[in-house]
Image: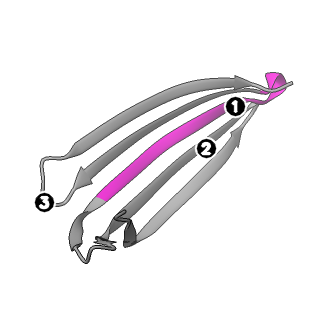
Amino acid sequence: SDSSSTSTVLTGGQFGAQLGWLLGDYHVDAFGMSVTQGGSSSTSSSSGASTTTDIPAYRSNTFGADIKYVPWNLSLSSMIQNSKQADANFKIRMITVSWNKSF
């Protein structure tokens, strides 16, 4: 029976920052992050066949904000994320809005 093994290596960098403000009964946070990755994947089989595939670089940028009403411990969060591959027409946009009540 033929078996195979795959090895994938992704390299890149990331950067992010977050700022927060206490405005009366509200705590407001804003954040952003950028990640870039790319690499390659190699597969080899016990029959001797092997393949190496480049994984093109892509960048993902995320921005968001959190607003917390401190007396009720109630949070409203939002985030937008854009991802794009460097050399193709590949794009993802994701928007998230959520709320949380802690007891």
Mark 3 Cα shell of 10 Å, populated few (<14), some (14-19), many (≥20): few
Q: Please say whether residue 72 is one of the residues in the magenta stretch.
A: yes
Which residue position is annotated with label 1?
A: 68
Q: Is residue 32 left or right of residue 5?
A: right
- Residue 42 image point, x, y percent: 30, 72
Q: CA distance from mark 2 to mark 1?
A: 9 Å
Which residue position is annotated with label 3?
A: 87
Quarter of the picture containing the C terminus is top right
**Does 62 sit above or below residue 44?**
above
Q: Are marks 3 and 1 in contact (CB under 8 Å)?
A: no
Q: Please say whether residue 33 is one of the residues in the magenta stretch.
A: no
- Residue 55 image point, x, y percent: 25, 65
Q: Nearer the viewer, residue 18 or 26?
A: 18
Decide which of tag 2 and tag 1 comes sooner along the chain: 2
Which residue position is annotated with label 2?
A: 29
Span of residues in magenta: 59-73
Mark 1 Cα shell of 10 Å, populated few (<14), some (14-19), many (≥20): many
Query: Residue drawn 46% across and 56% down?
Result: 33
Q: How is the image coloured?
A: one colour
- Residue 84 image point, x, y percent: 24, 51
